[in-house]
């Protein structure tokens, strides 16, 4: 069976996902597109035989031939589209963030629970990365015993002027927020943010680097460095320290060169290249799960929990204090 998909938002990641769905993955076809910029949608549709451009995202969701929806529009529009897809009973893959406030994410959780069907997946693709999966398999397999601490780093070579302080949490560290609690199967209870001396490469509206400290229900302590003007490349590090040993995220594959009395290897420069394979695996898995009414990946509750954690990190930074992370009990629906 081929899943007929409608994509809302044909910007940077939307066009990449369309290319994946149309040319790389199996079992799906893109039959509909919508974007506030109609010309952009028309241009994307030109490469997709039979795909129809709808005037609004809502019209796309309501179209009878659209069986599942991919939301890759601007973050503040996510809530309305995801809620509309739930109301229409259609599976929806929503790029992160699920919504731009924790309250909006909770409304989505409540709507999905009320619908009684598992329909929502959030685009936290790191859970599909080969390296993170190997790390999780080692932890789940008891290789290091009980986890005690996680040291991690999220470094970008540089960011544009439009990138300001809050984005280090809500756009960048948000990926660690999701993947780390999945890695150790634990939830966070508090956050703190430390602000070291700024790098000379930052600008007036960006504290860079920062260190985020998280504590989990199970007593694990996490320190996460976010350094988005590190200059040398896109570098994701993660080391989990357990009672019996230590496991680290593998480095991306790269050849070693021995030459001129030096041993060298290269570091990826582009985040898209670092996680290219995981986006493919993520969407293929979503296609297969959507056909059988399941959600295997990060669900609406995970999207909500990430939003609550990000809010706590922002508050902790603003107040220079430890901020508690409090949510209602996880509904049994998401057990
Ligand atoms: P983008 O290039 O700005 O694309 C967003 C697109 O949505 C644009 O074409 C925009 O049109 C359109 N749009 C805005 N409002 C809309 C509406 N009401 N209805 C329909 N379309 C609308 O942004 P992007 O970088 O692709 O990011 C899109 C989303 O993906 C964001 O939530 C982002 O956080 C997420 N993302 C996730 C990852 C990841 O690693 N998982 C990576 C990148 C992006 P205009 O240009 O005319 O405004």
Image (spheres, helix red, strand yellow):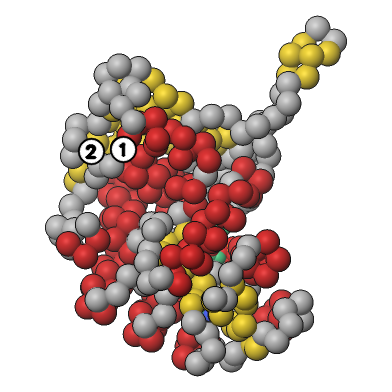
Please name the residue shown 54% across and 60% down the image: 284
Residue for point 67% across, 37% down: 268
Q: Quadrant of the C terminus?
A: bottom left
Q: Residue 103's spot in the image, x, y percent?
A: 27, 68
- Measuring from the top left, give residue 280's x and y in whole percent: 59, 56
For disc 1, the marked residue is 184
Q: Which residue is mark 2?
A: 216
Task: Tell me if residue 331 can be seen.
Answer: yes
- Mark 2 and ligand 1: say if the CB distance to the nearest ligand atom is below 8 Å: no
| Mark 1 sits near ligand 1, with its Cβ under 8 Å away | no
- In the rendered image, the vertical position of residue 160 relative to residue 140, given as above or below: below
- Quadrant containing ligand 1: bottom right
**Marks 2 and 1: CB-CB under 8 Å?**
yes
Q: Which mark is residue 91?
A: none
Q: Which corner quadrant holds the N terminus?
A: bottom right
Q: Nearer the viewer, residue 117 or 325?
A: 117
Q: Quadrant of residue 106?
A: bottom left
**In percent of the image, x 40 and y 35: which residue is there?**
137
Q: Earlier in the sequence, mark 2 or mark 1?
A: 1
- The extreme top residue here reads 261
Q: Quadrant of residue 210?
A: top left
**Circle 1: element type:** helix
Vertical order, 311 against 238 (above or below):
below
Badge 1 local density, few (<14 within 10 Å), some, or many (20+)? many
Q: Secondary structure at mark 2?
A: strand
Tell whether 201 sits left or right of 239: right
**Residue 228 or residue 239, whichever sits in front:** 239
- For image coordinates 49% across by 76% down, the residue present is 69
User: Picture coordinates of residue 130 (x, y %)?
Assistant: 53, 40
Q: Nearer the viewer, mark 2 or mark 1?
A: 1
29 up-or-down from 226: above or below: below
Where's residue 196, x and y in %?
42, 29
């Amino acid at each position: 069976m081929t899943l007929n998909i409608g994509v809302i938002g044909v910007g940077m990641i939307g066009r990449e996902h369309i290319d994946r769905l149309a040319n790389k993955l199996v079992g799906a076809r893109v039959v509909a597109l919508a974007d506030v910029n109609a010309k952009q949608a028309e241009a994307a549709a030109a490469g997709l035989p039979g795909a129809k451009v709808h005037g609004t995202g809502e019209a796309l969701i309501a179209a009878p031939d659209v069986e599942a929806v991919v939301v890759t529009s601007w973050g503040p529009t996510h809530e309305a589209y995801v809620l509309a897809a739930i109301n229409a009973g259609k599976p929806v893959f929503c790029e992160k963030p699920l919504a731009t406030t924790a309250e909006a994410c909770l409304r989505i959780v409540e709507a999905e629970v009320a619908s009684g069907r598992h329909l929502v997946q959030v685009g936290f693709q790191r859970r599909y990365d080969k390296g993170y999966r190997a790390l999780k398999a080692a932890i789940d397999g008891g290789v290091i015993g009980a986890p005690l601490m996680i040291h991690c780093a999220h470094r970008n070579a540089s960011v544009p002027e439009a990138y300001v302080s809050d984005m280090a949490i809500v756009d960048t560290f948000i990926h660690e927020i999701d993947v780390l609690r999945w890695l150790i199967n634990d939830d966070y209870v508090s956050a703190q943010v430390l602000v070291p001396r700024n790098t000379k490469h930052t600008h007036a509206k960006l504290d860079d680097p920062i260190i985020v400290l998280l504590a989990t229900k199970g007593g694990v302590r996490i320190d996460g460095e976010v350094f988005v003007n590190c200059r040398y490349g896109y570098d994701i590090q993660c080391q989990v320290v357990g009672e019996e040993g230590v496991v680290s995220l593998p480095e991306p594959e790269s050849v070693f060169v021995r030459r001129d009395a030096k041993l060298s290897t290269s570091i990826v420069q582009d985040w898209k290249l670092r996680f290219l394979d995981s986006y493919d695996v993520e969407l293929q898995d979503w296609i297969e799960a959507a056909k059988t009414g399941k959600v295997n990946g990060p669900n609406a509750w995970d999207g909500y929990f990430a939003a609550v954690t990000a809010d706590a990190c922002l508050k902790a930074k603003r107040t220079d204090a430890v901020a508690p992370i409090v949510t209602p009990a996880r509904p049994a629906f998401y057990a």
